[in-house]
Image: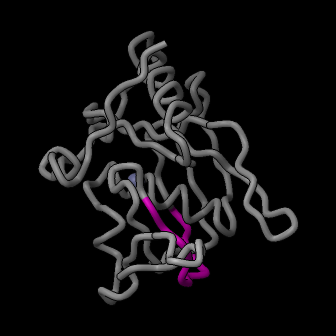
Amino acid sequence: MAVREIILFSEHEATLRDKSKAVPFVNQKVRRLIRDLKDTLEASSDGIGLAAPQINIHKRVVLVCPGDEMNGEWHSGLPVALINPEIFEASGERRDFDGCLSFPGLYGETTRPHHIRVTGLDEDGVPFDRIYEGFNAVVVHHEIDHLNGVLFIDRIENPQDLYTLRKNEYGETVRVP
Ligand code: ZN
């Protein structure tokens, strides 16, 4: 078990801006990295994705938790590792919720494709070719952005689309720009 420190934008922007390098093959070191990412994501309270550069390892490895909407609520599944993920089809751009473990407490609305086709290697080094739809596509797109040093705040079109959540005097959760 190795929970790593998640790099915060407020302290280490340059680290998050660095581009990550492709993984030539899935060896012991890569498997250990995936384990550390899983442990770190599990230890976070509300993460549904994590990219290696967020724990200061600039390799093209991300974790995503594909999920399903049930009764209007999002239920995320177990984390899946994507190695050297490459998007080669993207469509259905629309606005959706966004947030990032490197920006605790900050949320926003970004425009991202809701249908993407992604290739890469799974954690056993086996090539995959998958389609992600809806919010799952948003999560995968967000994580792949991290490998290129792109952060969700870069995709915010209007400053008022960025907000924090606070409880007001009535105990209701409200957006604070
Ligand atoms: Zn993120």
On the image, the x and y values in percent for residue 58 come to 26, 36
Residue 167 position, x and y percent, is: 51, 70
Q: Quadrant of residue 142?
A: bottom left
Most foreground residue, 175 or 37: 175
Q: Residue furthest left?
A: 14
Q: Residue at the spot x=39%, y=76% of the render?
A: 163
Q: Which residues are magenta?
A: 88-99
Q: Colour scheme of this structure image?
A: one colour
177 to 146, vertically: above or below: below
In-front residue for pair 143/10: 10
Most frequent secondary structure within the magenta stretch: strand
Position above or below: 81 against 155: above
What x and y, as percent, mark residue 133? 69, 65
**Position in image of residue 33 (x %, y %):** 41, 22
Residue shown at 62% from the left, 37% from the top: 80
The residue lying at 60 percent from left, 22 percent from top is 124
* The magenta stretch spans residue 98: yes
Q: Residue furthest right?
A: 71
Assign ligand 1 to one image quadrant.
Answer: bottom left
| Residue 103, picture quadrant | bottom left
Q: Nearer the viewer, residue 80 or 170?
A: 170
Determine whether 96 is above or below 100 in the image. Answer: below
Residue 150 covered by magenta stretch: no
Q: Residue at x 75, y 53 (%)?
A: 75
**In the picture, which quadrant includes the C terminus?**
bottom left
Numbered label tally:
0
